[in-house]
Amino acid sequence: MNTQDVRTYFLGLQDRIIGALQAEDGHDFLRDGWTRGPEERLQGDGLSRLVEEGGVFERGGCNFSHVRGPAMPPSATQHRPELAGAPFEAMGVSLVMHPRNPYVPTAHMNVRMFAALPEGREPVVWFGGGMDLTPYYGFEEDAAHFHRTCRDALAPFGAELYPRFKRWCDEYFFLKHRGEPRGVGGVFFDDFAELGFEQSFAMTRAVGDAFVHAYLPLVQKRRGTPYGERERDFQAYRRGRYVEFNLVFDRGTLFGLQSGGRTESILMSMPPVVKWRYAWQPEPGTPEARLYSDFLRPRDWADLARDGA
């Protein structure tokens, strides 16, 4: 296990993603480095890159973090109870982009490595991550492109991985209390080491490297679409679902808060403007209703693209 190679890759990935998104947005992203010393509960360092009130992105950012702690928090051991209390090392890149134009979807991506360091035993190392798309106004060709890019990135590592990780994503990014998905999904994996360290790391790199190809063409295609207050109002309402998921279910958010991580970086994923309404339903036949009927349900998006739909 060479964690320095993983760190070098994650920092390079952050640079490449920010370079592409910054060029599209037209505004410089804030650069905020931080460190945690030995006197603190969690030690390590990180780099947050953030834009607010940008040309395209109303709020968005991409974080790198590399931390070490004395005991794994509950969110990291729910599937591995035998590692409870073990020291750990974790690093990764996580991003969320909230565009201003409601026709441009919100996107999330995360790639990470986790190592439990139980005393007297070999380290237990695994990878996790994925990406998912949250549209406010759905376009089938956009969802298909996003999923096809995910599928192509995973193909060299086994044809079974994309359908498996797609199902995992559909199940994970699901608001149980609402009975609805957060968006159109993508791919998600966690506790993954079954290909061995080198190949599991290579697969994680393939996912990270695919993000710009999956998302940026959608931004470029939709950023100039005209919109008004109706679309902005619906966007703010749907953003409420994003907040609910991240604060109630998201393992990365829970891990960060439970382990004593940096709150500003952890909550960078929150959208800037959000609304909630009591028992609201879209009017039948509207584009807002079509989001629910046609997009907030699992579909074979990658196959839709292949069939030319």
Image (cartoon, rainbow, N blue to C red):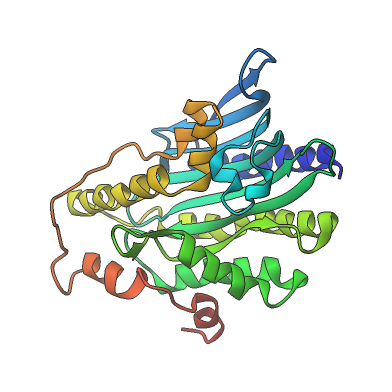
Give the image location of residue 106, x and y in percent.
42, 52
The residue positioned 47% from the left and 27% from the top of the image is 264
Name the residue at 58% across, 36% down: 63
Q: Position of residue 61 (x, y in %)?
A: 51, 37
Judge whether 141 appears above or below 240 on screen: below
- Which one is in front, 70 or 51? 70
Residue in front for this viewpoint, 268 or 278: 278
Badge count: 0
Q: Is residue 262 left or right of residue 2?
A: left
Q: Is residue 194 above or below residue 211?
A: below
Which residue: 24% across, 68% down? 287
Q: Residue 72: x and y, percent?
A: 63, 37
Residue in the foreground of this view, choosing between 280 and 17: 280
User: Which residue extends farthest bottom?
Assistant: 307
Tell me if residue 247 comes above or below residue 279 in the rendering.
above
Residue 27 visible in the snapshot: no
Residue nearest the observer in this picture, 87 or 63: 87
User: Residue 285 vs residue 109: left or right?
Assistant: left
The image quadrant where one finds the N terminus is top right
Does 51 appear above or below 186?
above
Left or right: where 5 falls relative to 60: right
Q: Position of residue 182 (x, y in %)?
A: 38, 59
* Quadrant assignment, res 103: bottom left
Q: Is residue 164 visible?
A: yes
